Image (spheres, rainbow, N blue to C red):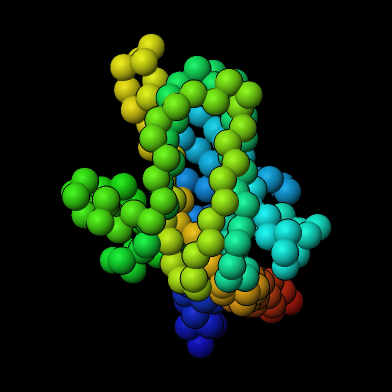
Amino acid sequence: MKRFSVRIAILVAAIGIVWVSQASNANAHGGVSNEGNQCVMTIGPYRMLFTGYQPERARAEEFCDDIPYEGKAIVVLDHVDTVLREMPTDFRVMKDVKDLGVTAQLEQLGTQEEMEAATLLYEAPKLYPRGTKQFEIDLPKGNYIGLVTVADKNADIVHTSVFPFTIGMGYTYQIINYILIGIGFLAVFIALGVFVFRGRETADQT
């Protein structure tokens, strides 16, 4: 019976760890991740900051990769690595027509023709010597995919960051992720409690 309980505890712990991992991955959208209070976009070896604003709905708030309300939103990209200022950068917003969600990868987006057909906003490559790019979007509720591409001429390579995001989903999406993470941690704590309890029982018997 004790062995059976320990096996269940191990299984619960494993499920909890996987659960937390999956929920955490869902909370990090593609090339964008939350680091402290900043939303960091990874482009090859380089980084940008992604910040969304909706001054008409929430003046004082900043958003990472999920815009909670429909309507106008301002997105600002800041070059963390100043070398990016010397690289032509383009930006694209696509409708997530394939329902790829937060795990979307570049190779899953299809051919260039398919990407262009799904594109809602595109700005051709240019330099941003001040290190800041600001643009406005006004899109209905739904799932979208953003792409930022930089051309590193010195290394003769192009880096692309894919970042899925949502519009008009409110805060529900984020709350669900936090609940899932909490359930995962709870499962791990329960499993640890079983180990401790069984360990004490064994010690008392000896």
In this rendering, is residue 93 above or below 13? Answer: above
Q: Is residue 154 left or right of residue 37?
A: left
Relative placement, left or right, of 44 versus 166 is: left
| Residue 183: x %, y % from top left | 61, 76
Say whether residue 189 is left or right of residue 98.
Answer: right
Quarter of the image with the C terminus is bottom right
Q: 190 or 199, which is in the foreground?
A: 190
Provide residue 165's location: percent of width, then percent of height.
Answer: 49, 60
Residue 84 coordinates in the image, percent (x, y): 52, 23
Q: In the picture, residue 192 is in which quadrant?
A: bottom right
Q: Residue at x 78, y 60 (%)?
A: 59
Q: Is residue 53 above or below residue 195?
A: above
**Quadrant location of residue 200?**
bottom right
Specify the farthest residue to the top.
Answer: 154
How many numbered tags mark residues here? 0
Q: Which residue is found at the position 56% from the left and 45% from the top? A: 135
The residue most toward the right is 60
x 53%, y 48%: residue: 32
Percent of width and height locating residue 179: 63, 76
Q: Is any part of residue 34 visible from this angle?
A: no
User: In this image, 196 relative to 3: left or right?
Assistant: right
Q: Nearer the viewer, residue 174 or 167?
A: 167
Q: Is residue 77 among the parts visible in the rendering?
A: yes
